[in-house]
Image (spheres, rainbow, N blue to C red):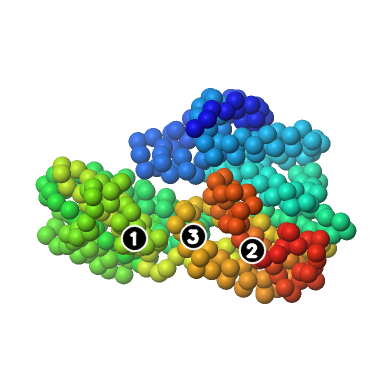
């Protein structure tokens, strides 16, 4: 990978404030302390912050760093172009992304959506920041104008088993499994069907840990009630390596994209943990709910409206499933038939892969669905922004 001077990243960090930036890096390090699993998950979730710090340090730059550097430059230029109230709003938006579980994704998604519309020939105004409008962007081409509301929805909203909760459970269980594997060398599969789910704030997480520990210490290999079914069996799946790198591709093929998987090794033994919720994930429905909630509040109704959605907390396999099985399309098209969508001429959806890795305007760059019932649906001037992909 090539190095990069990181000038734009350094300038954006300058807007945030060097002291606040270092404080935020310390907060992230504290969140990740003592857990490799959580550390990897945080590095993914906070990819923008990680990339900005790498750029600031002049370290090797890959596709994500190059994209972040470009968008950082746009953020700095936008801040300079805004008047005082706009700069206050931009500062608040940056600050919100550096607090608690927040990320800078909202800022970078906004900049990405604006850049995409500029490439399509639209004049773009940052109405939300500049004027305090409920929508984020106003795009214009010829005599036609549309409002764009940018929003982020987490795929976790469509899952009964949250990935963050799963990581916490695995960290809790790990020492018990290490001890158990030392006493019972071999290859095992622990399957969990979590009928009542498992969420990050769920008080049942310690109870689930206790149930797993009790199962390991007993002669029974099944524990079942209304909340969950636990079953411990020999692992029959063959793999070249009895570790996470060797097993995970085979496990994913075996259990599918919805499964939560972990591989524990120790003392010559291996235990695979595979968990599923009691019902199928419904990420598409979560996207639907979010669009229905924001459209009436974010769009004025005086001009055609576009919802630009970023679906977070998903991986490439899950996103491909949602796209190829037409689940997102189904949710979007259903939403466009409902009263909440009467001012919406089109919906677009991205994942962070399209934000940072895919070709900006390639065939998989975004999913977009036009509302055929909207009066502006056949506008030739808006076509580049609204025609279905």
Residue positioned 68% across, 39% down in the render: 92
| Residue 276 vertical placement versus 133 (above, below) | below
Report x, y in % for residue 276. 35, 63
**Label 1's element?**
helix
Is 389 situated left or right of 304 in this image?
left
Q: Which residue is mark 2?
A: 389
For residue 294, say whether it is visible: no
For residue 155, which numbered disc appears in the image? Answer: none
Of the two numbered discs 1 and 3 on the same chain, state the one appearing first in sequence: 1
Q: Is residue 348 left or right of residue 201?
A: right
x and y, in percent, of residue 388 in the image: 67, 66
Going 41% across and 41% down the picture, which residue do you hit? 40
Q: Which residue is mark 1?
A: 253
Sequence-wise, the earlier of marks 2 and 3 is 3
Quarter of the image with the C terminus is bottom right
Secondary structure of the residue carrying numbered label 3: helix
Residue 161 position by quadrant: bottom left
- The residue pinned by badge 3 equals 320
């Amino acid at each position: 990978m090539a190095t990069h001077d990181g000038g734009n990243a350094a300038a954006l960090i300058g807007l945030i404030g060097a002291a606040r930036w270092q404080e935020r890096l310390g907060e992230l390090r504290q969140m990740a302390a003592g857990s490799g699993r959580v550390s990897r998950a945080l590095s993914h979730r906070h990819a923008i912050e990680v990339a900005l710090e790498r750029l600031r340090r002049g370290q090797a730059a890959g596709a994500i760093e190059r994209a972040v550097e470009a968008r950082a430059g746009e953020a700095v230029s936008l801040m300079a172009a805004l008047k005082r109230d706009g700069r206050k709003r931009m500062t608040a938006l940056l600050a919100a992304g550096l607090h608690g579980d927040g990320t800078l994704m909202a800022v970078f998604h906004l900049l990405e959506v604006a850049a995409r519309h500029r490439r399509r020939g639209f004049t773009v105004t940052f109405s939300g920041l500049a004027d305090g409008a409920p929508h984020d962007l106003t795009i214009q081409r010829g005599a036609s104008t549309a409002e764009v509301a940018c929003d982020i929805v987490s795929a976790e909203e469509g899952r009964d088993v949250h990935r963050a909760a799963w990581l916490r459970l695995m960290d809790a269980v790990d020492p018990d499994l290490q001890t158990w594997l030392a006493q019972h060398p071999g290859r095992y599969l622990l399957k969990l069907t979590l009928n009542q789910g498992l969420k990050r704030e769920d008080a049942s997480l310690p109870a689930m840990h206790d149930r797993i520990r009790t199962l390991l210490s007993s002669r029974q290999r099944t524990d079942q009630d209304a909340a969950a079914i636990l079953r411990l069996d020999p692992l029959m799946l063959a793999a070249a390596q009895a570790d996470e790198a060797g097993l995970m591709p085979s496990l994913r093929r075996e259990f599918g994209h919805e499964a939560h998987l972990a591989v524990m090794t120790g003392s010559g033994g291996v235990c695979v943990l595979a968990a599923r919720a009691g019902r199928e994930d419904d990420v598409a429905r979560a996207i639907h709910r979010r669009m229905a909630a924001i459209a009436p509040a974010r769009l004025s109704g005086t001009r055609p409206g576009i919802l630009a959605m970023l679906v977070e907390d998903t991986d490439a396999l899950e996103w491909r499933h949602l796209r190829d099985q037409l689940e997102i399309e189904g949710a979007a098209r259903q939403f466009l038939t409902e009263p909440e969508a009467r001012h919406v001429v089109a919906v677009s959806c991205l994942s962070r892969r399209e934000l940072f890795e895919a070709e900006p305007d390639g065939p998989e760059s975004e999913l977009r669905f036009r509302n055929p019932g909207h009066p502006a649906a056949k506008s030739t001037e808006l076509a580049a922004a609204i025609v279905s992909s």
